[in-house]
Amino acid sequence: MCKNRFQQNKTWLFVCLVFCLLTFSKTVNAETKHDTYIVVIQDYGRPLGFIDEKNNQISGFSFDIMTEIGKLSGLRFEYVFAKNYDDLLKLFLDNKADITPSIAISEERKRHFVFSKPYESTPLLLFVKASEDSISGIIPKIKVGAVKASAAVRYLMAHKDIELKQYSTYQEVHMALLKKEIDAYCASAARVSGLLKETNTHGSVKSVGEPVGVVNRAIAIRKDKAWLLGIIDDAVNKLINSPNYKGIRKKWYPEELQ
């Protein structure tokens, strides 16, 4: 008799516990979706992230991706703009930002962020001046530029016989090559395509050799808000399998330069 009553009590307690956990989960989820999260769009330039001179608004592939993520997840976003990675990181360290998209996954960045499932994988290429004929790939003693903390840095550091120079922005590394301060730089073709447009330097550089590596871009979330990862990952999965994702890519990468 006592044993049966004990079993009944255990079962009842278990049912109550499950009910409470489910209720709590739904409450947290509802509260999470009613909060407004600060999204930082970095100044990658066209097509990733930039200020549209026509309306002075944030625009680009990154912004459109986050707009769709907001629709699919039910999360509310407020957007701010950062000129470079250092400024972006400072916003996070000062508790003034929660999320940033189109950021390359790297070991250094994992110290500060948790990353969603990647939604873009792009080869990293070596670029030299268009008139350069003596460099056909990574060779000893050349000076190679890259944006600091980017995925390119990790790949280039494996080449101990080159001189690696790191810059705060892609615009800086591009201009360093044109000024002959470096011999080459490493970036994705899509990123360089945007640089050439915004700096009006079409035909000034060319890619050489085999890809240096691959950059996987994802949405980065501040570590103390890692509970958002499941919600955002679910939205990323829905987005990359939808016609909307193809539409965004076609809008910003009409020639699919990757």
Image (cartoon, rainbow, N blue to C red):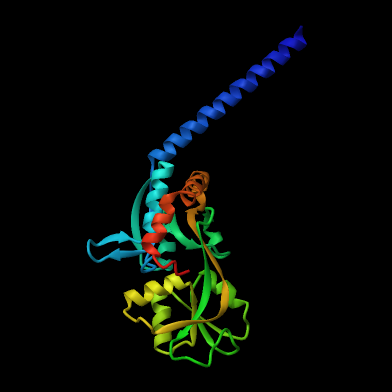
Q: Residue at x 43, y 71 (%)?
A: 191
Q: Is residue 145 above or below residue 50?
A: below
Q: Is residue 236 above or below residue 82?
A: above
Q: Nearer the viewer, residue 115 or 236?
A: 236
Q: Residue at x 45, y 82 (%)?
A: 206
Q: Nearer the viewer, residue 72 or 4?
A: 72
Q: Quick one: quadrant of the N terminus?
A: top right
Quadrant of residue 64 within the rendered picture: bottom left
The spot of residue 124 in percent (x, y) is 53, 72
The spot of residue 255 in percent (x, y) is 41, 68
The spot of residue 2 in percent (x, y) is 76, 9
Q: Nearer the viewer, residue 144 or 65?
A: 65
Q: Nearer the viewer, residue 250 or 30?
A: 250
The spot of residue 145 in percent (x, y) is 49, 80
Q: Is residue 93 above or below residue 24?
A: below
Quadrant of residue 88 within the rendered picture: bottom left
Is 9 displayed left or right of 85 in the figure?
Answer: right
Is 143 displayed left or right of 245 in the figure?
Answer: right
Task: Confirm whether residue 96 shows in the render.
Answer: no
Quadrant of residue 160 within the rendered picture: bottom right
Q: Residue at x 69, y 13 (%)?
A: 8
Is 18 displayed left or right of 202 in the figure?
Answer: right
